[in-house]
Amino acid sequence: MREELDFLQPFFLGPAGENDRWLEELIVEFVRDHAFWRRNFRPEDGHRITAAASYRPDFLQAKARTRQALIRLSGELKQSVPIFHPRYVGHMSTDLLIPGLVARILTTLYNPNNVSEEAAPVTLTHELRAGRDLAAMFGFNVDPSVQPCAWGHLTSGGTVANYEALWNFRAVKFYGVALQEGVKRAELATGPVGPLRKELAEYSEWELVNLSIGQTIGLRREVAEAVRERDPTAFPRLRRAVRGERLETLGIQEFFARHPELRPPRVLVAASAHYSWEKGMKVMGLGTAQLVKVAVDDHMRLDPDDLEACLAEAFESRTPVLGVVGVLGTTEFGTIDPIHEMIAARRRWNERGADFFVHVDAAWGGYLASVFRDPDGGFLSPEKIRKGFKYFPSDLVYRAFTSVRHADSVTIDPHKLGFLPYAAGAFVARNREIVDFITQQAAYVFDLGDVEDEVPREQQLRNLGQYILEGSKPGAAAASVAVAHEVLPLHSEGLGRVLRHTIRACEYFYESAREAAGRLEDRVRLIVPFEPDSNLVCLALNRNGNRSLAQMNRFARRVFARMKVDAARPVHEARFIGSYTSLRREGGEDEQCGRILGELGIDPATFVAVPARPDEEADHIFILRHTLMNPFLMDGPGERSYIDLYWDFLEDAIDAALVE
Ligand SMILES: *Cc1c(COP(=O)(O)O)cnc(C)c1O
């Protein structure tokens, strides 16, 4: 344990700001270095702000006002939530990696804009490299000489990366239909093309919306080649025609009006998925009514049987499925969906002529993949990984992580388990050719063979703004992620070592929860509702003898009041800061609810869909939620760790709530 803690120490500012001198040294060094760089650009121009200027009264006054405003800000910030401290076990944030933090500050002085190469020749390289690091961590191919080759880029966060998945998927899903329509309009023949080796005109629309991403990419290329071979002059005509038929051109309403056989597509997500999927369906105009919530099992993981039922329901009614989203670490419970089951389901449906794209929302748990990576490449065996843990990884978790590479795309947040500053999310796609379907360039639909062949893909992607949802974006975020990955590579001996330590803390928390439950047995029932799959552990509690859910929730809230961020109480008075979540009746969580209520001794009849009074807390189960990602949780003042101290605190909080 000591050795692991020693390993971590250089990388963080520390709970008591222990590494402040080192951080200061780095910042001062690179601020000076930056000023020298400015001075050396056209030194013959001399200075615009003279040394004498700084003695002018107006100059002094401006400095004073600036300083005053900053002093005020710095004072205000003291009311911030101390997320850096091991006593903070609330949301998904903690101390930052010094290499990433300094890279961010240092690069901000240069203020590059990663929207395009012109504005950011240096940090664009960092961004594409960071994307490649992430893709390689999941096991995607990143060698451009082998197809398909993955790519990734940064976003402002997981939310935007999730939107991007929908945007990419939609562009590919309905491309084949537009292509067919364009070929018809341009009165062209293609000969046998695509996986079914027939004239494009002979494909049914159902067949076209059930091609995989790779097949649609191949079809597009084959059609282009066939047309060009037969009549090179027809090519521009075809390009225009196809563009005119695309959903992105016509809008959803007109596109589906022209294709009455096609139904609007559904997106399937686990009931436990992040609310950004609902937002995404609204933003994309796809509608939340088309977002199908797949039930979760007893452990809050997507239920493969219900997934199968939802897929069957969609495909039997001839409704295209845009994508199925699995969560690698749910935001509320940290649980991990069986990604391998989603991949297997796709294989089965493919045999029956139906396809859907697979996205893994790994905003939270994605970086844990580094624990699974051998520094020499490839995945470590489960036996090797398990040497460092008591429970982790379960068979399901191991299979889920090693199956991400079969998904079409992934969301991952460097600003969560990457220990980096906001705003840094990322979108990774298994096949970078997908960008051809979304590029904004004038020749955007169908320019295979003219522009694209001449400009290598690597070079094209440096025009980043063409291929992503966002526009101007901080190159400093890219430098921060790339430098952090360089110092702590994404394998078991790099960042994986830091994360291993946090998972051990999580296991210790889980085990000590049972001991705490034993100590509290005479007063309350304390349970861990779901076995932890990642660095998140929840607790539910009920006072002995109580059978009413509303009363249980009120009691748990009173306990929680002692660990919540409260404007009325100075933050430094908090012994611990946590967070909470709820299990609700709606959302397909009924079965887990029944089991949990049973374990807590609650009468299920007191759990209602609509409470009698609006203030009656009878429609949900209130749960304490602990994000255990701080690197120093297993350390602590004296002999005992912060986790031991947490149980002391919780016991006191429970005792106080009991007498309240
Ligand atoms: C945090 C999270 C998101 C949203 O990411 P932001 O970075 O907050 O935009 C999406 N999905 C999951 C599973 C998350 O944990």
Image (cartoon, rainbow, N blue to C red):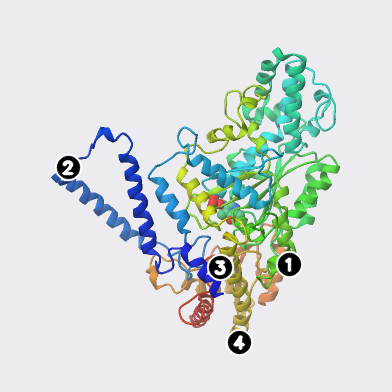
Q: Amino acid at mark 2?
A: Ala
Label whose residue precedes the other's in the sequence (2 or 4): 2
Label whose residue precedes the other's in the sequence (1 or 4): 1
Q: Amino acid at mark 3?
A: His
> Which quadrant of the structure image shows residue 43?
top left
Which of these two is toward me, 335 or 376? 376
In the displayed structure, 362 sits above or below 533; it is above
Crowd tier of the residue under label 1, counting other residues whose Cα lies within 10 Å: few below 14, some 14–19, many 20 or above = few
Q: Mark 1 or mark 3: which is in front? A: 1
Asked if marks 3 and 4 touch (Cβ < 8 Å), the reply is no
Q: Amino acid at mark 4?
A: Asp
Q: Which residue is mark 2?
A: 53
Crowd tier of the residue under label 2, counting other residues whose Cα lies within 10 Å: few below 14, some 14–19, many 20 or above = few
* Element assignment for label 4: loop
Q: Which residue is mark 1?
A: 383
Disc number for residue 626 = 3
Q: Which residue is mark 4?
A: 522
* Element assignment for label 1: helix
As drawn, is 630 to the left or to the right of 136? left
Residue 400 percent across, percent down from the top left: 72, 57
Label whose residue precedes the other's in the sequence (2 or 1): 2
Outermost residue, bottom side: 522
Q: Is residue 546 visible?
A: yes
Q: Is residue 611 visible?
A: no
